[in-house]
Image (cartoon, rainbow, N blue to C red):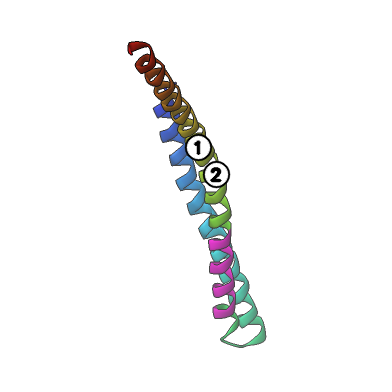
């Protein structure tokens, strides 16, 4: 499998994981809030639990995407270091060549 294909599949998995991670706490907290309102004969637990569910969902998505992009950032930093080293070597070689010309 090509590297580009792996990145595409990894992105698709990330998108589906984000969707599931967003929906699960929201629906679960909505269900709990609805059941509490029904049981206690009130109307505010649903709203409270929806807000908590949304907060939990965004926190989970933040953690997942942070870890996902951390790997990409490390790869990017390694590539940048490699190119910086090549640039330094090229500059060193060009300086040496100029010395020998004179």
Residue 94, position in %: x, y? Answer: 37, 19
| Residue 5 location, quadrant | top left
Specify the segment rendered in magenta. Answer: 47-59
The image's mark for residue 70 is 2
* Quadrant location of the N terminus in the rendered image: top left
The residue carrying mark 1 is 77
Instruction: For label 2, count other residues whose C-alpha is less than 10 Å away and answer few (under 14), some (14-19) or many (20+).
Output: few
The front one of 53 and 82 is 82
The residue lying furthest to the top in this view is 100
Q: Which residue is located at x 55 percent, y 74 percent?
A: 51
Q: What secondary structure predominates along the stretch shown in magenta?
A: helix
Tell me if residue 86 comes above or below residue 56 in the rendering: above
Asked if residue 4 lies in the magenta stretch, the reply is: no
The front one of 41 and 19 is 19
The front one of 68 and 33 is 68
Residue 12, position in %: x, y? Answer: 43, 40
Residue 34, position in %: x, y? Answer: 58, 76
| Residue 101 location, quadrant | top left
Q: Which residue is located at x 48 percent, y 27 percent?
A: 85
Residue 26, position in %: x, y? Answer: 54, 65
C-alpha separation, residue under disc 1 versus residue under disc 2 = 10 Å
Q: Earlier in the sequence, mark 1 or mark 2?
A: 2
The image's mark for residue 57 is none
């Amino acid at each position: 499998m090509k590297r580009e294909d792996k990145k595409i599949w990894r992105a698709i998995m990330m998108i589906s994981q984000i969707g599931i991670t967003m929906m699960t706490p929201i629906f679960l907290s909505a269900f709990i809030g609805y059941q509490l309102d029904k049981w206690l004969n009130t109307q505010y637990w649903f709203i409270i639990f929806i807000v908590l569910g949304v907060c939990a969902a965004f926190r989970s998505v933040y953690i997942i995407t942070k870890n996902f992009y951390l790997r990409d950032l490390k790869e990017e930093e390694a590539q940048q270091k490699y190119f910086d080293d090549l640039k330094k070597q090229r500059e060193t070689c060009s300086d040496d060549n100029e010395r020998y010309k004179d």
